[in-house]
């Protein structure tokens, strides 16, 4: 099936074709006709399935078909897309601009971590499609700089992640400002009880789509484990990058400090690297992503803040320098490669401290990952596990973008006015004798950006 057969206009199909896509993915094949029909939609799809185009294409098509081409200043916001993180917001708005190249619609993206005045200026000029993180959108609502009374289509993208990050009260405040008659599209990687409750109150007789369940890793991703001693991980990573001539590698670490330290080590090895995490300014995060996407940066080192915020065509390699605290995050991490039908490789460097984490991951994905010892980096068979300190509230030092962190706000989406930091709860540990499992992510109604 082609994009034109799905009911999209020639202008939209032309932009999609120019971008190099000719055959829709399964989620696009199902979602596009459903959105074009004008009804509500509840869609289950993990990252890497092409879901962004699954809603941006039909939204552009619907709005362009009913556009009266009013002057820019007179244009009300007709579509609102909410996303959990800054990076994802920027990525979605970029897709809107790419696919809307030949239609007379404009778009804007607003998120925290950057000045609000340029955003106010953009909104004054008139915007058809607005992409936003919940916290910064509320900032604009409180200042009276955004008008949502004419919204025709609402999208909640990665709704499960927004609930994990404690945005539920923010979302409900946004919903209260929207007109009651509108089309609602909810996309989520999982259908938890919380998601079902949200959907029941938001959606009206929705069409339901579920593609590539979150906990089934994409089969086209080649996954393997390199057992290694904890203090040999950095030399092994440098060895793999150099001997295999890897030119674009996304590396995940457990902590922000670990990400910064690894970047310094790789730079000393002559490997260009930058870090992206919650303590980095938005300018630094944008620069790192831009250089990584255009190929001028060899290695991007990230905490789990980036697990759902990076969309790069044909990304060949993802490395788990540290295994994630939450098994499901492994699926999101490796989902950065093997996207929309492409092949990819996911490599995990696993030391003795992480054997329990590895067991949890293999239980989740229902398969045993192949082990491959790299010559010269054989692990010490007598090494004993050491506890890995984790904050209660599930977060590895606040890198997962979840609420209830010591910082007192979600680092994943930025913004102003964070709540005062709360004392950290008792530490959870992995490894050592009598390991304790990390607590489930704490959900809160507090503010976050």
Image (spheres, rainbow, N blue to C red):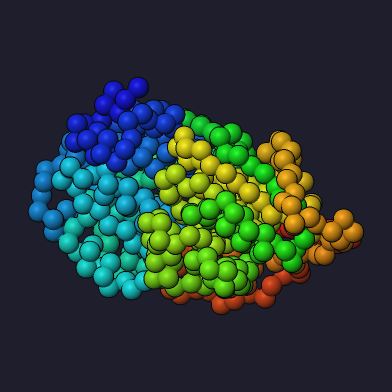
Instruction: Give the quadrant of residue 399.
Output: bottom right
- What residue is at 70 percent from the left and 47 percent from the top? 225
Instruction: Give the quadrant of residue 103.
Output: top left
Depth check, front residue: 151 or 165: 165
Instruction: Give the quadrant of residue 153.
Output: top left
Judged left or right of residue 105, residue 159 is right
Res 354 visible: no
Image position, residue 65 (x, y; %): 18, 36
Numbered marks: total: 0
Image position, residue 449 (x, y; %): 46, 65
Quadrant (top left/top right/bottom left/bottom right) for the N terminus: top left
Image position, residue 329 (x, y; %): 61, 50
Image position, residue 284 (x, y; %): 42, 70
Res 227 visible: yes
- What residue is at 47 percent from the left and 47 percent from the top? 315
- What residue is at 22 percent from the left and 64 percent from the top? 122
- What residue is at 47 percent from the left and 34 percent from the top? 341
Judged left or right of residue 159, residue 374 is right
- Residue 372 sits above or below residue 174 on the image: above
Depth check, front residue: 373 or 357: 373
């Amino acid at each position: 099936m082609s994009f034109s057969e799905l009911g999209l206009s020639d202008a939209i199909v032309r932009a999609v074709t120019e971008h190099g896509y000719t055959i829709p993915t399964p989620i696009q094949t199902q979602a596009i006709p459903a959105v074009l029909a004008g009804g509500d939609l509840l869609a289950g799809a993990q990252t890497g399935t092409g879901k962004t185009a699954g809603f941006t294409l039909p939204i552009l098509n619907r709005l362009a078909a009913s556009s009266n081409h009013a002057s820019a200043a007179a244009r009300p916001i007709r579509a609102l897309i909410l996303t959990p993180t800054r990076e994802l917001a920027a990525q979605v708005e970029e897709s809107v601009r790419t696919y809307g190249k030949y239609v007379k619609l404009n778009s804007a993206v607003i998120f925290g971590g950057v000045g609000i005045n340029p955003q106010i200026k953009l909104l004054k000029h008139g915007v058809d499609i607005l992409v936003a993180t919940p916290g910064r959108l509320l900032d604009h609502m409180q200042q009276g700089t955004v008008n949502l009374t004419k919204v025709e289509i609402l999208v909640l993208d990665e709704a499960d992640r927004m609930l994990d990050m404690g945005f539920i009260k923010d979302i409900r405040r946004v919903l209260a400002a929207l007109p009651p008659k509108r089309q609602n599209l909810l996309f989520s990687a999982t259908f938890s009880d919380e998601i079902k409750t949200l959907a029941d109150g938001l959606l009206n007789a929705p069409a339901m789509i579920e593609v590539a369940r979150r906990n089934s890793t994409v089969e086209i991703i080649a996954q393997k484990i390199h057992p290694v001693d904890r203090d040999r991980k950095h030399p092994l990573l440098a060895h793999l990058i150099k001997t295999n001539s890897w030119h674009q590698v996304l590396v995940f670490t457990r902590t922000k400090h670990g990400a910064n330290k690894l970047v310094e080590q790789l730079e000393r090895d002559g490997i260009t690297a930058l870090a992206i995490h919650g303590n980095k300014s938005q300018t630094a995060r944008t620069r790192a992503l831009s250089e990584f996407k255009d190929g001028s940066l060899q290695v991007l080192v990230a905490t789990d803040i980036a697990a759902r915020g990076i969309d790069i065509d044909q990304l060949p390699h993802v490395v788990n320098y540290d295994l994630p605290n939450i098994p499901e995050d492994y699926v999101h991490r490796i989902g950065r490669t093997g996207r929309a039908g492409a092949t990819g490789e996911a490599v995990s460097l696993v030391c003795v401290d992480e054997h329990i984490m590895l067991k949890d991951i293999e239980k989740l994905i229902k398969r045993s990952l192949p082990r491959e010892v790299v010559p010269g980096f054989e692990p010490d068979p007598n090494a004993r596990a050491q506890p890995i300190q984790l904050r209660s509230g599930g977060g590895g030092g606040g890198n997962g973008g979840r609420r209830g962190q010591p910082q007192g706000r979600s680092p994943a989406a930025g913004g102003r006015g964070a709540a005062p930091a709360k004392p950290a709860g008792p530490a959870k540990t992995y490894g050592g004798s009598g390991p304790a499992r990390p607590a489930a992510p704490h959900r809160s109604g507090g503010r976050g950006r």
